[in-house]
Image (spheres, rainbow, N blue to C red):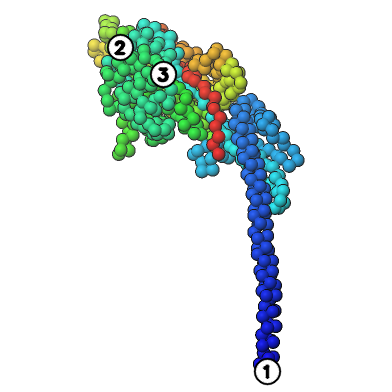
Amino acid sequence: MRRLSFAMSRAARRAHPLRMRRAGARRQHGAVAVVAVIWLSVAIAALGALDVGNVFFARRQLQRTADLAALAAVQMIGSTGGCASATTAAQQNAAANGFTAGGTTTIDTTCGRWDTSKSTYFGTNGNPLNAVQVTTTQVVPYFFVGPSRNVSATATAFASNIDAFSLGTGIASINTQQSALLNAILGGLLNASVSLSVGDVQSLASAHIKLDDLRVALGAATMKQLLGTSVSVHDLMIAMATALTAGGNTVSAGILNTLAFAVPGGQNIALGNGVSSAPGLLALEVANPESAASASINALDALLVAAQIAQSPHVNSDGSTTQPPAINVAAALPAVAALSLQVVNPPVLAMGEGGTDASGQPRTGAQAASIKLNMTLPPLLAQPLNLGIATISALSTPIVLTLAIAPATATLSSVDCESSKAATRATMQVTPGIALLCLGADSNCSPTTKPARMKVASISMALLGQVADVQLAGIKAQATPGQTSLVFDGSSGSFDVTQSTNSNAVGSDLSSLTTGLLANLGAPGAVSIKLLGTADLGALLQPILSAVSIALSGLLQPVFDLLNTLIVPTLSLLGVQVGTATVHNMSLTCGVSQLVN
């Protein structure tokens, strides 16, 4: 029994190494499998990384192609060809950079409008189109770890074409006689003593201020902040001088600095029109205000507009409206006894894109000032005329000649930016202001109100007292010009040019208005005669009154001639004209394309 156990033990010991060898072999086989799995995973990951890297490389190439194509396309969006030219430019640029559309590669171009005032920024609606979105797509195969996949990249480029203009005066040709009148007007608007020479005026008329330089001078961080700034006229003039100095125009800067020292503070104006309830200097209508940084405005136009804004009606905190004081300019016109003007609505400089907004209204527009001018006429008889049996008294009620002019307007229809300056142009729709000339016993002059009657003469006799009372009905005449188109281009080498329109031959003077006014003197009911308090005998004496009206026309004609020779220059210095409108195109800037998305 003991011998059998020993034999079995020896057999077991002999079998143990075999089992151990077999177990080790099994363990080796498992380790090899694990290593194989690890190496296979590494190989798959490496091959997958190559595929993923290839996809990222393809996407980067697509993005580069889309970026360059969008930048090339947006340069053509403002040209005559519009979106069609932009699409062609995008395709040609992509092809030049090695991207050929067709088969597994595509390029899509969408024209639209980029506007930071909208939450979506880019949209296919809007006028004008100022942005192009390019999408490039390519089918990229997976060489090792999967099927093919579509890879795409999108780029949006924006370029804003900006024109700056005003309804101006052609003031650069001012002469010595007009200089005294301009000083009187500016002095009244600025509440200061102004003494600009003809050379000073011409220097300011040819000076331009870059908006970005003005932003820096006023300490604004952005163009949007500049438009929201409110500043006194004094500080604005100092800032304009600083901006001119930054641009290298030290002569005009010195003129503005000298003038600014004479101007008191407290006449605050807003720089952006429409930013607040108060009227502003500049109506900037662009998709992105920062794109207007390189645009410029005329120094003299800006000075005159700012001065008129400072003396325009403004709404008080309690809701009431304070009317501006009347500016007496009779001192500069010796031939006139009493002449004053009021700025009823100030002008505004315009800078922006063409086209229309979402409501269909012109996007960018300038306006001239609304002016009300009153001139009190001298009596027809300086002293009572004694005829022996009767005495004709002098004019007992002052006759006031009032000229009210609604603002002329100019809206920017389109800006066409081409490869050459001569071919680049801006098109505007211009409407001269409506002029209303009234002759009456007060200064009320509106289209819906009849002027008050004027007492021309009172005839009295020694025994009977007043026997006759002669009155003229308040009369008025109106000129309503139509709309015309003006095109500004760079054929002269500069976009700083002026053009005038006279859409219905009203003319640049008041001759048509005064002719119409004088014609009304002979109309039925124009003259009223009461004898001894009786009823009006004007209708019965119409043939005689027609002859009287002719005589009155002769007496009043010198006064009306005075309007043409004195009042028209006075108005033109403020950018106000009768029957015509002069547009001063200050600058035109074709936008530099930039990627925005």
Please name the amino acid that badge 3 sits on.
Answer: Gly
Q: Residues within 10 Å of mark 1 (few under 14, many from 20)?
A: few
Q: Residue furthest front?
A: 3
Under circle 3, the secondary element is loop
| Amino acid type, label 1 | Met
Identify which residue, 485 or 440, lies in the foreground: 485
Q: Are marks 2 and 1 in contact (CB under 8 Å)?
A: no
In the picture, the quarter occupied by the C terminus is: top right
Residue 276 disc label: none
Residue 252, position as x, y percentages in the image: 37, 14
At 60% across and 18% down in the image, what residue appears? 420
Q: Check the picture and name the quadrant holding the N terminus.
A: bottom right
Q: Secondary structure at mark 2?
A: loop
Considering every residue shown, the one lying at the far bottom of the view is 1
Q: Which mark is residue 195?
A: 2
Report how far apart the C-alphas of labels 2 and 1 lie in the structure: 144 Å
Q: Say which label, 3 or 2, has the lower sequence index.
A: 2
Select label 2 or label 1 by which is in front: 1
Image coordinates of residue 514 in percent, x first then y, are: 44, 13
Taking the spot 31% from the left edge, 27% from the top edge, the residue there is 232
Given contact means CB atoms under 8 Å apart, are the residues at marks 3 and 1 in contact? no
Q: Position of residue 250 (x, y in %)?
A: 36, 14
Q: Mark 3 and 2 residues: CB-CB less than 8 Å, in contact?
A: no
Residue 407, image quadrant = top left
What residue does disc 1 label? 1
Name above or below for residue 161 compared with residue 393. Answer: below
Vertical order, 422 against 114 (above or below): above
Residue kind at label 2, given as amino acid type: Ser
Q: Residue at x 69, y 87 (%)?
A: 7
Q: Residues within 10 Å of mark 2 (few under 14, many from 20)?
A: some
- The residue that label 3 is drawn on is 247
